[in-house]
Image: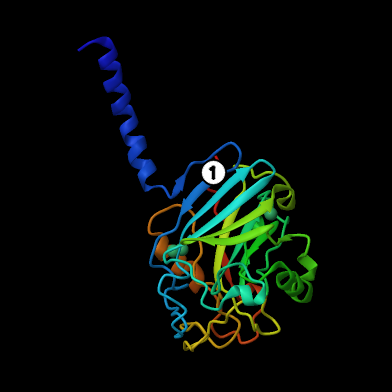
């Protein structure tokens, strides 16, 4: 064997374990500019493990099953891409209500830009019924909604005005195949993404006729209905999120079910501490 062939073989042997590990990791493509791809398992579009879709035929299987979050910084803008398991359709003809080309999905993409205790918001947006840890509080949230910006901004003004400087309505929102795409100005996120940032996608469904307390979110009840998710409770104590990301580790489906099951099932007028606490994911943090 020539010395160069021996070196190649050595390199291949050393590289092999790293390749095997990378295949198991949900994280790909971390860039110095803060870009990455983070995979979520298919088949966990059941919240704490019990949620069921509304019965109307527009809620196709897989519609709320996140399979990937991709963040692509491009100059002064950032493309945020949330992919689900089924092709995104527009059964309610969003053009008729100045919408964005899809109908049933809505995703809240939370960002923790500093990972500092006491910095940011621990509460979820109205209607999500979740909270965040003290050192993982969100500093920005991007709303990917089929509703046009005027409607989303009006809902923010009515229901979450205390956080309006932290809530980002994208410059562009559209559907591409199985992917919801949002383009935001990096400045609206407080600057260009950094590999240290934390992210969390809460998958919801666009409700055009929301309750007074809900920011365009669809409710989860004890039993599913034509336009209601089932498998939760009829109070606002159960997390109204269908799929979330969990930090890399063994059995992410089980982990999600554990996280979303930890709420006070008896609290009919829940306090913040009664709600499930969702984690941030720091895909590229060292
Ligand atoms: Ca999923
Ligand atoms: Ca924070
Ligand atoms: Ca998940």
Task: Name the residue nearer the viewer: 266 or 12.
Answer: 12
Visible residue check, residue 128: no
Q: Quadrant of ligand 1?
A: bottom left
The residue that mark 1 highlights is 284
Task: Name the residue nearer the viewer: 86 or 53.
Answer: 86
Percent x, y of residue 234 = 55, 88
Instruction: Write the residue at 56% across / 73% down.
Output: 103
Task: Name the residue nearer the viewer: 156 or 137.
Answer: 156
Task: Name the residue nearer the viewer: 130 or 152.
Answer: 152
Left or right of 32? Residue 229 is: left
Visible residue check, residue 207: yes
User: How many numbered callouts?
Assistant: 1
Q: Which quadrant holds the N terminus? A: top left
Question: Which residue extends farthest left?
Answer: 1
Instruction: Write the residue at 79% across / 68% down.
Output: 162
Instruction: Write the residue at 55% across / 78% down.
Output: 92
Question: Which residue extends farthest front?
Answer: 96
Percent x, y of residue 125 = 67, 70
Instruction: Write the residue at 29% across / 20% down.
Output: 8
Task: Answer with the quarter of the image where residue 210 lies.
Answer: bottom right
Vertical placement of residue 255 versus 237, above or below: above
Percent x, y of residue 258 = 46, 68
Left or right of 113? Residue 202 is: left
Q: Which quadrant holds the C terminus? A: top right
Percent x, y of residue 285 = 56, 43
Q: Secondary structure at mark 1?
A: loop
């Amino acid at each position: 064997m020539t010395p160069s062939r021996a070196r190649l073989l050595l390199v291949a042997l050393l590289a092999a374990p790293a390749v095997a590990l990378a295949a198991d990791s949900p994280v790909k493509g971390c860039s110095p500019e803060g870009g990455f791809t983070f995979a979520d398992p298919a088949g966990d579009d059941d919240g704490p493990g019990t949620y069921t879709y509304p019965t109307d035929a527009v809620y196709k299987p897989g519609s709320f099953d996140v399979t990937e979050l991709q963040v692509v910084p491009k100059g002064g803008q950032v493309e945020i891409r949330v992919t689900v398991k089924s092709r995104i359709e527009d059964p309610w003809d969003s053009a008729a209500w100045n919408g964005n080309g899809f109908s049933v999905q809505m995703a809240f993409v939370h960002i923790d830009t500093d990972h500092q205790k006491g910095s940011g918001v621990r509460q979820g947006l109205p209607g999500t019924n979740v909270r965040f840890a003290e050192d993982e509080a969100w500093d920005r949230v991007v709303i990917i909604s089929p509703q046009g910006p005027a409607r989303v901004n009006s809902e923010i003004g009515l229901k979450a005005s205390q956080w309006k400087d932290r809530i980002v309505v994208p410059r562009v929102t559209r559907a591409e195949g199985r992917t919801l795409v949002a383009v935001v100005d990096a400045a609206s996120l407080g600057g260009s993404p950094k590999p240290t940032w934390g992210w969390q996608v809460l998958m919801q469904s666009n409700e055009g006729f929301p309750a007074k307390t809900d920011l365009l979110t669809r409710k989860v009840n004890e039993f599913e209905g034509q336009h209601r998710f089932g498998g939760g409770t009829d109070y606002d104590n159960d997390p109204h999120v269908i799929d979330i990301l969990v930090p890399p580790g063994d059995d992410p489906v089980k982990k999600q079910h554990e996280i979303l099951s930890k709420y006070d099932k008896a609290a009919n007028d829940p306090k913040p501490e009664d709600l499930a606490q969702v984690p941030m994911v720091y895909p590229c943090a060292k």
